[in-house]
Image (cartoon, rainbow, N blue to C red):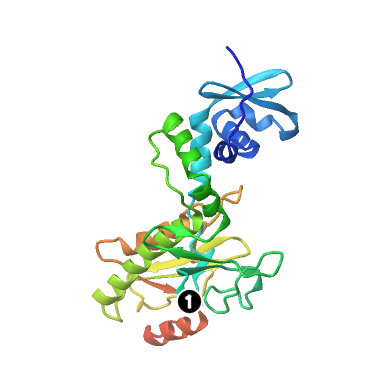
Amino acid sequence: MTTTMVFLNEGQKMIYGRKRIIDTFYKVHPVGKDILEHEIGEVTFDDDHVLLNVEDNLLRIKRSEVIKNFWEHRTRTPSYFDYKIWRSRPQEGGKYLGVPIAAIDHNAQVNRILGSDIKVSTDEDGTKRIYFITPVNKSCTCGSFDQMKEHQTELAVEFNKYCPEIDFKPVCKHIKWYEKQLLLYTDIQLVNNRYPSNHPRVCVYQYDYGRRKILYKITDNRYSPNMEWTPQNTWQEKDVYDPSSMPTGNCWEVLEGALSQPVPYKIFQYSSSLEAIMNRTSYPKKH
C-alpha cells in the first residue's frame, strides 16, 4: 500500500475537510466515536481511500463515503420552521432579485408562535439573513451556493470519479427548503380548494422552539365534544432536530402525511384566535 500526500484543489478541499472526514468515519466505524479530533495527525490518500493517522495507526475510509457525507450535509433540507418566504420583494436597479427566503430568529419572537411575530435572524454585522432563490435555474445568493458554483468543475470531477451515482449540481439548503415548502404549500392549497371550510378532518400544529419539537393534534371530527385545541399533553409531539442538531424531517412528515391521506386533513397553524374559532364551531364541552 502506497500512501501519498495529495495537493488538493479548492473543490477537493471543500469535500475532504477534516470535519467531514471525521464525521464520516464516526458513522461508518463505531470505534471512530472514541477518536478525538486532536488525536488525528496528517490526512493522506491511497487511491480511492482517505487515510487518517491516529497515534501512528492508519485508518482507512473510502473517498466515496466522504463524498456522500459532504453531499448529504450540503443538500440537507432544513426544518419547515427554519425559514419563511419573506413578504417583501426587493429589487436592485429595477432587477428582480428572486424569491426571498428569510431565516427565522425564534428567540426574538414575542409569543413564540410561528407566524405571530416573525423576526429575521441577523449575522454578526446585523445584516438580515435573507437569501434570494431563482427557481428557474436553481440558484441562491448564499455563500454556500456561491462556493459550489465557483468550484463546480473541480467538484464534478471528484463526484464523477469516486461517486458517479450522484448527479452533482450546485445546490444549497435554501434551495432544498424552498422546493419542499413549495410542494407542501401547493398540496395545502389543493386540499383547501377541494374540501369545504367546515371539513371535519383537521391537523393543528405548533412549533415548540424551546424544546425543538413539533406539537400537533389530528382529529377526524373537529366538532366532537371535549376537543382540546390548546397544545398540551393530549397533543402528539416529534423532534424537529436530532441530538447533533441535524433536522430530522419529522415536521415535514407530519404535515405531508396529514395531507396525503385518502381523505386528507386540513392543516391549521395553532394560535389563540384559531382556538377561539374552533371552540365556537365545536359542540359545547361537557362539564
- Observer-nearest of 11 and 184: 11
At label 1, the amino acid type is Arg
From the top left corner, tell me how far across and down residue 172 is, in percent. Answer: 49, 53
The residue under the point 52% across, 65% down is 81
Residue found at the very far bottom of the displayed protein: 280
- Observer-nearest of 175 and 283: 175
From the top left corner, tell me how far across and down residue 212 is, in percent. Answer: 58, 60
| Quarter of the figure with the N terminus | top right
The residue under the point 45% across, 29% down is 162
Residue labelled with disc 1: 89
- Tell me the crowding category of disc 1: few under 14, some 14 to 19, or many 20 or more residues within 10 angstroms, Cα based: few
Query: In the rendered image of this protein, does residue 88 appear above or below residue 251?
Result: below
Mark 1 secondary-structure assignment: loop
From the top left corner, tell me how far across and down residue 69 is, in percent. Answer: 52, 39
The residue under the point 65% across, 19% down is 58
Is residue 247 in view from this perspective? no
Quadrant assignment, res 266: bottom left
